[in-house]
Image: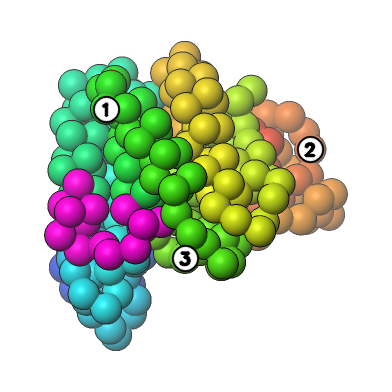
Amino acid sequence: MSDTQSAADARDPATVADDPNARRDAAIRALIDREPERAGDLYTLAGRGTLAGFETKGRDRDTLGADATWAGYGLGSLLLAAVCYRAAGRKARATTRATEGIAVATDYRDAVFETATERACTEEFRGAFGVAGGIDTGGFDRAERRYAEATVEDPVSVATDPLFEGLRKAVEQAGRNTPAAFEWDDLHGDDTSDASYLAARPRFLRQRLPAVIDHVREAGRVAPPRATTEHNNDNWRCPDCGQSEAHWVAGEVVCLDCDVRLVEK
């Protein structure tokens, strides 16, 4: 099956009903194909589907009720869509998607979430959308203040909640294989005893995310997310760099460093 067919199949309702991650996987394949605008379209559909509750096979999540924090993965997909549009040189579309994401995050902040940390995370999302879409929202400043004012007994547990993970995974993927790449330890603070652990997130992103977007625009592409990897695999070789750093993602085997499909030795 060609990648074009895969993308078309991912738009079919029956396929998505069978596999809620079909559109997200198709978006990743579009990134491997160096088609960031198509990836942006697919991430848009994936994000809206997740916000509608289609995240787990065989179960509809109540993303405006008991499962509200799962909306983080939907917002994360919309954020990646905006980043992909920037890579494609479609800034107007990136701004439109960022505006959509900000509106959704604001609604969750004002009408759905009740805890101080959840509301702070929506501001963190607003800040990330602002950078991705070229909109100055001041979200990172507000997020840092809200986190600093929150009382948190177990900030690490909070940071691994779907709402917070949705943002982390999106921004880490945006920076992956760029000179501005970063990981979990870079994003969070050193002190796991209080909310300063979380307040470090918007402070770091305020400084780093603009550089990520600049690199994405210059390169014209976005890397796929990191998944299962194996160094020095005896069965695969990268046609670009000649290395055997295997990376299995979205049904493809690609180079961990170059993000191109590997060839069998």
Report the disc number at residue 137.
1
Q: Residue at x 45, y 38 (%)?
A: 144
Q: Look at the numbered discs 1 and 2 and tell me whether their residues touch, using CB distance below 8 Å.
A: no
Magenta residues span 106-119
Residue drawn at x 32%, y 53% is 119
Q: Earlier in the sequence, mark 1 or mark 2?
A: 1
Circle 3: residue type: Asp
Circle count: 3
Determine whether the residue tagged by mark 2 lies in a helix, strand or loop. loop
Task: Please tell me whether residue 224 belongs to the stretch shown in magenta.
Answer: no
Instruction: Identify which residue, 176 or 152, lies in the foreground.
Output: 152
- Near mark 1 (Cα within 10 A), the count class, few <14, some 14-19 or many ≥20, is some
Q: Amino acid at mark 2?
A: Gln
What's the CA distance linking mark 2 and mark 3?
A: 36 Å
Where does residue 181 sit, x and y in percent of width and height? 62, 32
Q: Is residue 262 left or right of residue 9?
A: right
Which residue was labeled with disc 2?
Answer: 243
